[in-house]
Image: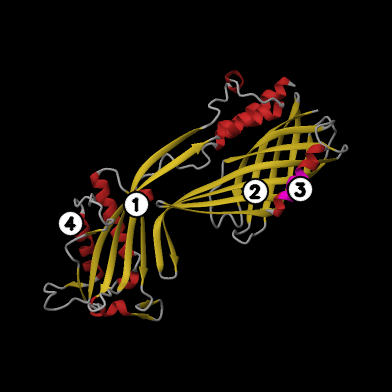
Amino acid sequence: MKPLYYLTAVFFLVTSISFSQGTYLGGTYSIGIPLGGIENYISAGSFRGASFEGVKEINSKVAVGWILGWNVFSEKLVNEVYTDDNLTLTGTQFRYLNLFPILARGLYEFGELDGTRPFIGSGIGVTADIAKTNIGLFSFQKTGWHFTIAPELGIKIPLGYGSITGSLRYTYGVKTKELDNVSYLSVNLGMLWGE
Amino acid sequence: MNSKKTLTRLLVLLTITGFSACYPYGNDITYEDLDIALTQYDKDYYSPGAYNYFQDFQTFIVPDTVIHIIEDGVTDEISRDYDKYVIEQVHSNLLKLGYVEESDPEVNPPDIAVTVSVTTSEHIVYDWYPYWAWFYIFIKKGDRVSTTSDEDNYPWNPYYGYGTSYTYTAGTVILEMVDVAKVDESTEEIPVIWAGVINGAVGGPEDGLKSRLSTGIDRCFNQSPYLFK
């Protein structure tokens, strides 16, 4: 749980310096593509994802912010055979992986202040992981916190009071005692409102 | 400013609505999806790549009575409609594996006996969906206003969320293979050298239940290739 305390502190620090001039608040819809770690457990892509984010532009090129995300991966495996020593179990498995990245974020933005702004950056923080397998009438669940880094590239296009934002983010969470590492690519599209 | 607030609320609402079904497949799970077949063998009789004493067995019997496992003092309410069918399925699987049925077990004790037992259990599941309450709290805290009046709750009611409950009966068929020569009548020890368990939710049409029983029993034997002769 320690990483959560650190991240909560970072979150409030970033939040406290935000919401003045050059600040944005918004959210994105997120599509997830499982990569190493996840794809051993669930190979199907996810159309269930979203994130809330806040960004503050420190100067004309650099911005800091935060992201609270949620990506749900799931897969049904029909009549999967599981063997452990002298025990064999056959049944349909329903696997669910809920990932909640909580990240502090730094961005480098290109282009003019009031124009279209491509950006690159990275998030750092933790990802809460709830991995649940239902088989037959039984359910098994593991939970953990992954230290996480999340490099990304994206674009912000001004529109009315806010901006349309799109990004491609690679999220990598390191292995924990209970859980394998997680990594996935997310395609994020949403809106930011601010001044 | 109002449009920003409205848009943010709309985003929150859409997200919560979208994730309220964050466990897909919930509505299209069939009875078959809930069936499992579990088997376990005695490691003194089989070790992959080393030895397989199951191959020494030639003859078998399947007792013609299914044991209903119930608690002491409780009336047996488990249906016997499927007992004969289950025994026939076990019998035919053993023949398919290559074993020979012993026609006169009192004179010639068989090598193995496979017993069949059945048990059921009732389960109640309670679900609670409090997400409307989360939404309410989020909005009100964002506005720095706290009220529980009906007017202010609208349209985020029901404030306390809602709950559902359902009951299901789980049924379990247990197959136990006994090494007859090792039965110790003085100590009443019965060596079970292989076991198969079929577990699932009881329900659905009669034909479907028979098919599920048959599939489960077949799976138990098919996933135990060391039993094949």
Question: Which residue is the site of mark 4?
Answer: B84
Question: Which residue is the site of mark 1?
Answer: B200
Question: Which residue is the site of mark 2?
Answer: A185
- State the separation of the CA atoms marked 3 and 2: 13 Å
Q: Is residue A7 magenta?
A: yes
> At label 2, which amino acid type do we have?
Leu
Which type of secondary structure does the marked residue at label 2 adopt?
Answer: strand
- State the separation of the CA atoms marked 3 and 4: 66 Å
The image position of residue A77, as x and y in percent, is 45, 52
What chain is tagged by disc 1? B
Q: Nearer the viewer, mark 1 or mark 2?
A: 1
Q: Is residue A37 magenta?
A: no
Q: Dots 2 and 4: beta carbons under 8 Å?
A: no
Task: Tell me whether marks 1 and 3 sit on the same chain.
Answer: no
Which type of secondary structure does the marked residue at label 1 adopt?
Answer: strand
Q: Earlier in the sequence, mark 3 or mark 2?
A: 3
At horizontal 23% and vertical 45% (from top left) the residue drawn is: B206
Magenta extent: A5-11
- State the separation of the CA atoms marked 2 and 4: 55 Å
Q: Is residue B9 visible?
A: yes
Q: Earlier in the sequence, mark 1 or mark 4?
A: 4
Which type of secondary structure does the marked residue at label 4 adopt?
Answer: helix
At horizontal 14% and vertical 74% (from top left) the residue drawn is: B105
Q: Is residue B140 above or below residue A33?
A: above
Quadrant in which residue B183 is drawn = bottom left
> At label 1, which amino acid type do we have?
Gly
Task: Tell me whether marks 2 and 4 sit on the same chain.
Answer: no
Q: Is residue A79 above or below residue B123?
A: below
